[in-house]
Image (tube, rainbow, N blue to C red):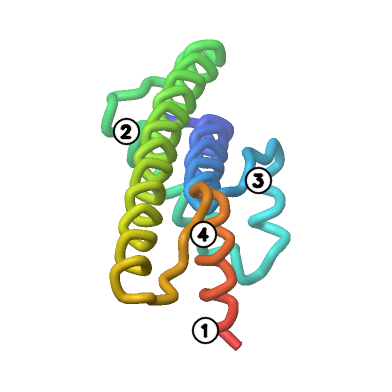
Amino acid sequence: MISGAQIDLAAAAIANVRAGRAGAPPISNVLELLDATPRLQRLLAEVRDDAEAALEAVGFQSDPEEQGIAACMRLNAKLYKEVDELRHALEQSVKLQSHYAMLLNCWDDGQRMQFKDAEEWLARLREVKKGGQS
């Protein structure tokens, strides 16, 4: 049987990876923050469910505590590697998008936005999302 503490470790890793996709840095007490924020409690339940399903899918056994910590650390490392790969892909995509925007703007005197990097693009995405929720 998988312990609640092991699920929480994996859930924290999953929550941090999800937040990392939106440009947020890892947070050590991410589960406490999710639990303390009513509109994020659904996300807390989702990441705990995802964590338990992931641990069960790999046949995780919760015998000694060290085994649980090691498995969570491996899962966390894998998730961070995936985030790094996705971040690199986003950086390359933003560069290409900005290059084509520049070419098209030169061609037709358009006003297409160009971004210096993925962080600037993500900031614009957050701004657009915020404007759509008002």
N-terminal label among 4 and 2? 4
Numbered label attached to residue 43: 4
Quarter holding the C terminus?
A: bottom right
N-terminal label among 2 and 1? 2
Q: SS of the residue at dot 4?
A: helix
Quarter holding the N terminus?
A: top left
N-terminal label among 2 and 3? 3
In the image, which is nearer the foreground, mark 2 or mark 3?
3
Numbered label attached to residue 56: 2
N-terminal label among 1 and 4? 4
Q: SS of the residue at dot 1?
A: helix
Q: SS of the residue at dot 3?
A: helix
Residue bearing the label numbered 3: 30
Q: SS of the residue at dot 2?
A: helix
Residue 44's x, y, as percent? 55, 55
Label 1–label 3 contact, CB within 8 A: no
Label 2–label 1 contact, CB within 8 A: no
Crowd tier of the residue under label 4, counting other residues whose Cα lies within 10 Å: few below 14, some 14–19, many 20 or above: some
Q: Is residue 97 above or below residue 92?
A: below
